[in-house]
Amino acid sequence: MEPHNKKRFKDDAVTGFHNNVRIVLPKIEGTKRNSSLTGSETHSLITSASSITPEMDDDSDLDEMALQEEDEDEERNGRKDGEDEPKQNVDDEYHLIKLSATAEKEIRQRAKQTLKKELTRLRYEAAAKRNETRRKFKVVIEDTRSQLIATRIEAEKVSIDRLEERAGKQQARIMQERAQRKKEEKGKEVEYGDRSKAHSEELASLRKIQAELDRARARRKHSLAAVLTTVNGKAKVANLLQHEVKRLERAEEVQKIIVELHSLGLTQAAIDLTHALQGKEDSEMEFRNQLHADQMKAKKKVSMLVESEIEKVRKECMAEMERKELERLEKERLEKEREEKERREREMAKLKKMARDMAMKKMFKESMFNTSVSRPFSFSYFPSLKK
């Protein structure tokens, strides 16, 4: 071999070695692709391929080191992301507090409406119970008042009869005395003045008695018993009873009617009315206490409902935010994996292209070298380098 060819071979070898550094070279498939080469060229290609295997191993180690450095960079980035997570959590909690405040306001508004409806329902129920108690007491008063009216009618009738009887007796007595006096005066001489005086007294007594009789007859004519015999009279009595019943619903009026019942001898009716009045007052007091207790219970229930509803909304908001955070982290992880995969694919494609180019270049140079040192009769597609 000529000296300048040897020097060029060494330079090419050094150049090829330096060019293959930091490159992952795949297995050379020159034996399959270059089927048209001669036997010596094929032998030289196989020899050159086996001679660069250690260099390929070194390049693989370098590539693994590069990947390890990239993994370390990713871990450092992950630690930075982990340091940023507390700040993100603080922002999420602040957002949660704002959201809970808004939800709490809405919940309290709904609870206020619910409490209003509940209190209205309780008041209606208490009013219905109170009206039922008053209705029962009104029935008792009506029965008592009917007895009282009947007793009044009977007492009025007895009083009128007694008055009329007394007036009739007085009138009969005066008339008898007057007749007796006239008989006595026939046989005696009586002065005119004394006779006129006695006559005037008798007439005055008779007029007074007659007035009492007329008053008794008028009372009998316009009494309740007489009024009840006519249609209009019955209506008037019914209206009178209703008016008196409404008046008697007041406690002081009931006390008056109880006294009147006792005075008329209706002791049992007075006792029944007293018990009914006491029962009515006890029932109304019980209804008031029950209404107050129900109102307090409803307020407490609504307050507990508000707290439970607020806690429920907070948990739902927290779960929703955690779900969104997990979705965001998963999306970021998938995006990073995709970007990393694409970057690796680009790097590998670039490395493969560089390795193929270097292999083709080296094959070309070796072919040129083999052609230059082969015998003249050896066939080659490349021009000879001899001068």
Image: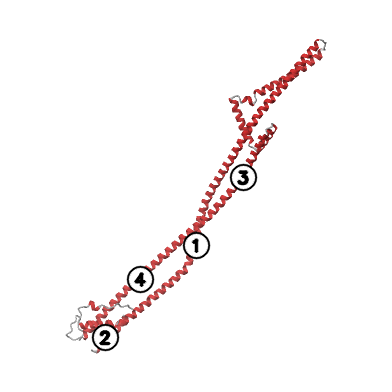
Determine contact: label 1, label 2, CB under 8 Å: no
- Quote the CA–CA distance across marks 1 and 3: 51 Å
Look at mark 4 in the image and give the residue it sits on. Answer: 343
Q: Do the residues labelled 1 and 4 touch (CB within 8 Å)?
A: no
Mark 1 falls on what kind of element?
A: helix
What's the amino acid at mark 4?
A: Arg
Question: Please, what secondary structure does the residue beneath circle 4 have?
Answer: helix
**In the rendering, which numbered label is found on residue 93?**
1
Pointer 2 residue: 9
Q: Distance between the residues labelled 3 and 2?
A: 121 Å
Q: Which of 381 and 163 is in front in this view?
A: 163
Say which quarter of the image contains residue 136. Answer: top right
Q: Where is residue 78 in the image (x, y as percent from the top left)?
A: 43, 70
Task: Decide: is 237 above or below 294.
Answer: above
> Distance from label 2 to label 4 (Cα)?
38 Å
Which secondary structure lies at badge 2?
helix
Along the line of sight, which residue is nearer the eye, 124 or 225? 225
Among the two numbered marks 3 and 2 on one chain, the one whose residue lies closer to the N terminus: 2
Q: What residue type is labelled 1?
A: Glu
Q: Say which label, 1 or 3, has the lower sequence index.
A: 1
Task: Residue 338: give x, y in percent of width and height.
Answer: 36, 68
How is this picture coloured? secondary structure
Instruction: State yes or no: discs 3 and 2 in contact (Cβ < 8 Å).
Output: no
User: In this image, 49 relative to 88: left or right?
Assistant: left
Q: What residue type is labelled 3?
A: Glu
Cα–Cα gap, marks 1 and 2: 72 Å
Closer to viewer: mark 1 or mark 2: 1
Q: Name the residue under label 3.
A: 286
What's the distance in space between the residues labelled 3 and 4, CA to CA?
A: 84 Å
Residue 56 picture location, percent across and down: 32, 80
